[in-house]
Amino acid sequence: MTLLLIIILLVLFSLISTLFYKYKKVFICFSILLVFGFYFFLSVNFFNKESFFPSKNIQYNLFCSNYYNLLVDSIKKHKLYISDNINDIKSFYIETNNSTQKLYLIDTSVYKNKVYLYFGITPVIFFYLPFNLITHLYLTDKFLVFILSCFIFLLSLFLIKKVSEQITDINKIPSNIVILCIFLTGCCNLLPFLVIRSTIYEVAITTAVFLLLITFCLFYYYINTKALKTQKILNFCISLTLCLSVGARPHYVLFVVLFFFVIIWLKYNETKKIKDIIYSAFIFFVPCLIYGSLIALYNYIRFDSIFEFGWHYQINHLNLFDYKMTITDFFIGLKNNLFIPPSINGTTLFSLTKTSGHRLGCEFITGTIWTCPIIFILFFIPKFLKTFYKKDINIFVFLLTIILTMIISFIISDIFGMVIRYLFEYLHIMIILSLIIFLFYISKVKDRTLKNFFNYLFILIFVFSLFMNISLLFCEDNFTICSSLQGTCHTKIIQFLF
C-alpha cells in the first residue's frame, strides 16, 4: 500500500532528525509545511473544489455553502434576513445580479415568512464582511476553513510547546517524537474531515475552536505574568475572544462561565483583596456585556427573543422546534462517539460506521479511541495533576481549565449527536492534553531501554493513528452525502493510496 509507505517515510524522516539535532528547527518547519500542504490538497481537490478561491460573485447552489455571504449582502442592504421571497416550505428566492436565484431551505431558519441564517454572526462580522468591503470579493467557506485550520494547528502546537517547556526539560525529549507529535496533532484530530468538506457547519466550528485556542494562549500568558497592567489587558482579551466564540457556537457560553470563575479564583488566591477581585470581575464582564448585548439585540430583532438563535425555527428533517434533550441521547452519543469501531471494507481497509438511535445526529463515524489511541494516556490525568498541585499552582489551574473545557465539550458533543465535526471539538483538546502528558513522562524516563520502548510504542501508535485517519477520510462512507460532487479525484486518490 502506498499509504503505508508514505507513513513509513514520515517515520524515517522523524528518525533522521535525531541525527541532525542542530537542524531540528528546520525539520520542525518542514513538518509544519507538510501538514499545511495536506490541508491545501484536501481543500482544492474535493467537495465543491471549484469554489475554493474568493470570487466576485457569491457562488450559489452549492451544498450548504457560502450562506454567510448571503447575510453579507443583506447587511449591506440594511437587512438581517436573507430572503422574504419564500416559494414553499422547501425553497426560497434571492435577488442577485439582476436575476432571481432559487435556493433550498437546508438548515436555514424561517420566522414570520422571512428566511434567516441561524448560524452565529461572528464569522460574518470578523471575516466575510470585512473581506468583502476591502477586496470587493466574496470569501468562500472552503478558503476560510483552510486558513482557520492552519491557525488551529499552529495554536495547538504552540500550547503543547509552551506547557511542555514549563513543566519539563524538552531537550530530553527525542527529536523524532517531536516531529511525530506535529503530524499527529495536524492529521489525527479529525480536523482534515472539516477541511475536506467545508460548509457553513465547518465554518462555525473552526471559528469557535480558533477563538477558544487563542483564549488558551492568552490565559497561558495571564497565569505567567505578574504585571498588573498586562493582567488587566489579558483578562479583557480572554473575555472578548470567548464572547466572540459564542457568536459562532452558542454553547461556548459555558466556557465564558468557566473562565470567569477561574480568573476570579486566581485573583483571590493572589491578593485576597475584595477590591482587586471585584475589579478583575468587572474587566472580564465588560466584553460579555457589550458583545452579549449585541447578540441579544441581533436575536431579538430576528426572532423576538434575546435567547433564540433560530435553532427552533430551523428547516430540516429533525423538527427541532419540539426537540427535548434526554439523558438517553447523551449515553447513546457517549457510547458511539468513544467506542464504536470502524467498519472493514476491501477498498480503504477501515471505513466509518453508520450510527443510529440518537434523536439529533446519526451519521457515519468511528469512536475516538480508534482514531487516536494516544488519548488512553488521559487515565493518568489525576496523577499528572497531583504532581503540579503543590509544585506550581498556576500551571495546575491552567491544565485543570483545559481538562474542564474538554469535559464540557465532550458532554455537549454527545448531546448534539454522533457527527464527525462534533467529535473534533473535544478530540483536538484530548490530543493536546495527551501529548503534553506523554512528553512530560517520557522526559522523566532515565533508563535508556525503557525510553526506547516508549519511543517505539509511540511510533506504532502514530503509524496506526495516521493510517486509520487517512483510511476513514477517503472511505466511501465519508463521501456518501456529496459523492456526486467529487468527480474522478476521489477514485484516483483511492487507487493511489490503497
Image: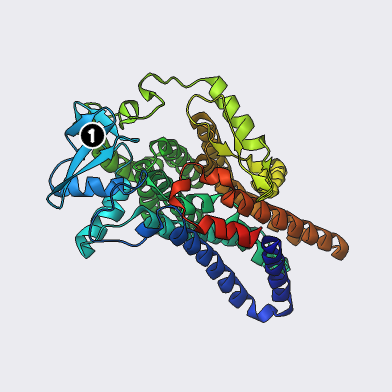
Q: At which x and y percent is residue 226? A: 47, 58
Q: How many marks?
A: 1
The residue where tag 1 is placed is 115
**Can residue 86 be seen by looking at this rendering?**
yes
Q: Residue at x 60, y 25 (%)?
A: 331
**Viewport quadrant of the N terminus:** bottom right
Q: Residue at x 60, y 31 (%)?
A: 334
In the picture, residue 455 is in which quadrant?
bottom right
Q: Is residue 386 above or below residue 136?
A: above
- Nearer to us in this view, 125 or 118: 118
Q: At which x and y percent is residue 165? A: 62, 63
Q: Is residue 324 above or below residue 154?
A: above
Left or right, residue 442 beside residue 99: right
Q: Residues within 10 Å of mark 1 (few under 14, many from 20)?
A: many
SS category of the residue bearing label 1: strand
Left or right, residue 39 beside residue 142: right
- Nearer to us in this view, 474 or 294: 474
**Viewport quadrant of the C terminus:** bottom right
Left or right, residue 56 beside residue 322: left
Q: Is residue 265 above or below residue 20?
A: above
Left or right, residue 63 beside residue 365: left
